[in-house]
Structures are given as C-alpha cells and as structure tokens.
Amino acid sequence: MSMLADEEQLLRSNIITIANTPITTTIYNVSLLIKLLLLLLLLLCQHFPGIYVVLDFIPNQTSKKHAWFVESNKADPGDKKNYYVWKAGSSLPNNWLTINGSEAWTNSSDRSAFYLHQLSPDLPDLNLYSRVVIDELNQILHYWISLGVDGFNIRHSGFMLEDSELNNDVQLNSNKPNPYDNMEHKNSFGLGSNMVLLKLWHHIIEDNQGQNGRSLMTGMDSWDRPIPSYRDQFGVTNFPHLSFCTVMNVDVNCDGSCMKNFVEENLKNVTIGKSPTWLLGSDTISRFSTRLGNYTKRSEVLTMIALLLPGSTVLYYGDELMMPDIGQADESSVSISQPWRTPMKWDNSSSSYGFSNATCSSVSSNDAMQVTEAVANGKSMLNFIKKLNKLRKADAFRLSSAADIRYGPDCSGTFSFVRGFDGVDCYLVIANLGSTESCSDFSSVSGGDKETATVKLVTPSAKSGYEEDTEVDTTNVKVKPNEGVVLSWKCGLYFE
C-alpha cells in the first residue's frame, strides 16, 4: 500500500501498473491486495481529474487451474462441456502451433480429448463461439464497470476465434528459428469474425459511459501480426477509442525511405479525430534493444522518432535502461518462453540488483545499466527519454495532430519531419537511418524559410558535433549514420 500512500507522488506519475498473475487467479476474484489497490485508485480518481484506471481484459484464455477448466476437464463436464475448445480423437486435430513453436493441443487423459492452447498449455483457449461463455465475459465487463474502472485493454484479440472446422494452417517455405513463424496462421489467428466480439464489447462500454462519464476502450494488441482493419469493420465514427498500437518493429536495414513509408502508412490508417499509439515495447514481444541487436545508437534514434511523432508512445519497463532479453546462459525459466520478462535492475547492491532480498535466478546478468547508474549518467537512455518527454510538452507537439505533420526532403537514408504551426516554435526532427553521413538543405521545409535554427536536442551517442542551444546552418545539415538531431525556429507564415 505504501506505493499509493503519497498522493503527490501518484499524481506526478504518468502511469501506474498493478499486475497480478493470471495463472492461479479467477477473473473476478483477484488477490485481496490487488483489489484494495484498485479500490484505492478508484477512490483517488473521484478526487483528482486526469487519473484513469484501465484493466487488462483477456477474453480468450484462463488458467487450467480455473474452476471453469477444472470442471470442463472432467469425464462428465456437465454445463462446462463447451467452455473451452475441445476435440475428441486419438491424434492431433490439426497442425496448429503455440506462439513458442510447440504443438497447440494437449491430450487430457481425464476427458479423453485434446484442448487448444495457442499461448501455453497452462492457458487453455476459451470457446468464444459459445453464447454462454460470451455472456460470462459480458458480465465480467459489467462487474468491473460497476466498480468504476475507466476502461479495458483487450489482450490477444487476434486469437479470440479460430476456424470452426479446425482446418490446418499453411506451411510456409521458410526456416525461421521459431516454427510458429514458418506458418501462415489464417485459420488460427486474425479471423474477421473477431470483429463481431470487439463491436459487442465496444457497445457495452459505450452503453455504460453514463455511469461515470468516462469509460473508454484502450488498445487491442495482436502480437505484432496483422489482423483485418478495425476501421473497416467499425466505421469511422464508431471506431474503438484508442487506435491500434503500432509496434516500431523496424530493423537495422530500414532506412529513411522505409521509415517514412512505415509512418505514412500507419498515420493513414488512424481514424479521423483519433490519435496513433507507437508501441516500442510490451510484455508480448522481445525487448526493443534485443530486436535491434543491442545497437544503442539505433535504439536512440528510433526512440526519438517514436516520442516526437504525433500520438502517444508506449515503452516496456526497462526499455529506458536498454535492457535486453535475458540470455539462456542465465539458466532461468523466464528465458525459456518469455525472455523479455526479467526483473528490473535497480542497483548493484546484491546479486538480485536491488529487486529483492532473495536470490533471483531470473535477474539477467547482462550489462544493461542499473537504475542508479542511468540516473547519474547524463547520456543514458533514461535521461534522453526525460528530455524527449519535456520537449513533447511544447505547443508544437502538444497541440498539433497527425494531420499537421510535414515531411522533410529525402536525402541519403534520412527521415525527417516538422511539427508545429503558425505562432509557435516549429521543430524539425532529423534521423539518419542510412549507412553514410547525410547532408541536406532543410532551409525551405514547411514552417517558413529559415537559414539558421537552434539545436534543441541531440541523440546521446551522436558524434555529428552538434551542441544543444547552439545555432546551426539549415542549408548544410550533416548527420552521421544512426544519429538524430532536433532543430527549432519560430514558425513563419509559410507553413503549408
């Protein structure tokens, strides 16, 4: 409870996450401590505007220890017979795999049938074709809304419904390390019928807005794999409240042109009046640092882009320390299936790095900075993100929208864009994603003809020679590979 005792500390925080394992808890009866924390948050929300409580809603899986599955797994399952996806027989129903590449079916000797589990054998898939199951899930939403929560983050939405005939997925002609990635999951993931459920729950949220005046749907993740367009299914005016999170899953080969196409395509799909969300990391994919091969300079540039584009940015805890996935050498069970889920390294006071007084086998021995080091290091990713967040408070970023972004000239792998409008300071964000030094004339970019500008921010590892709060000639801006710089000037009358 001490985490929430200081109201001022709570208000200074952008987001507080309270998590509880889904392995042994039921959907209603979370642990007493978690419930007390949630109720305290809900109480605080009534007194402080701008504080919202958003819960994860995982509609497709429960623990196999859940009472529903315990009953459904019996030889005589009674009314829980069709709560999960079961298939009788002596052989695997099809070739579906879990996200980790193992078989997605487990044979139960108790029921003499196979049950489906696309994430893990410990997390069986609910049968969302069952009207009874859907009614149960609807009641769960109503229950938490009645307590005053502000919204739900629908997790793993791409896995909700699968092909009712259980047809095989398509084997691809590839040889990626994870067998799951060598298949086209057209029958087990991203079915268009998922939209029917999303629309149903969207309407439940809308119908209950009157209870507290601010219920909302948040993002819907899909494990970084494409699913049918939400906008096409919901329509412009009835689109879910937060645009689908976009994973910045670009690699070292994505140059300026590639990044521009990536950004344009995603901004194009943002519904009118909505805001995009750029997801750098989450608890469902490898850490940002690992996906980029622990390339610090590249991580800095992409972080700068994500935080200065229109919309919101989401990072996974530890991304601000450049934490990589835990290595197999650490001999942790965490590293087997979800190597990105490793405890935070607070300091070097013990083998557990301040995370716990106990011996923590799942704390990585990697060379990522501890929090205490990052705070003291002026060029750390942590302090760089703090600078970016401070810059985001400027009117050019705070008040402009996705429709206001203007792109700079294409030059030697450079991606650049302008944020701002008449009457405020304009900001030119330049990111060299190419392999050679870029040189470009930015004096005529949207925002008024300016031959000089002020350097506002430089990526920490940059060697291009720019210093913050100094003047630069905009007719000859040179930026080295995998470096970034932000320039500023007073927007003129020629902003187009």
Image (cartoon, helix red, strand yellow):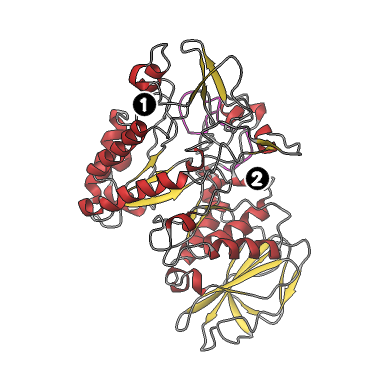
Q: Which mark is residue 291?
A: 2
Please report the bounds of the magenta region as a residue range: 351-369
Q: Eyeballing the image, is 6 above or below 307? A: above
From this view, report whether residue 487 is shown above or below residue 174: below
Q: Is residue 265 left or right of residue 40?
A: right
Residue at 35%, 46% (x, y): give it: 201
Q: Position of residue 414 (x, y in %)?
A: 70, 67
Residue 173, x across and y down, in percent: 76, 39
| Element assignment for label 2 | helix
Q: With respect to residue 351, does 89 lie above or below?
A: above
What is the distance, in whole Å, between disc 2 and disc 1 at their CAs? 32 Å
| Helix, strand or loop: magenta stretch | loop
Residue 183 position in % (x across, y down): 67, 37
Indicate the amino acid at tag 1: Thr
Residue occupied by mark 1: 25
Mark 2 packing: few (<14 Cα in 10 Å), some, or many (20+)?
A: some
Quarter of the image containing the C terminus? Answer: bottom right
**Residue 84 visible at all:** yes
The tally of labels here is: 2
Q: Secondary structure at mark 1?
A: loop
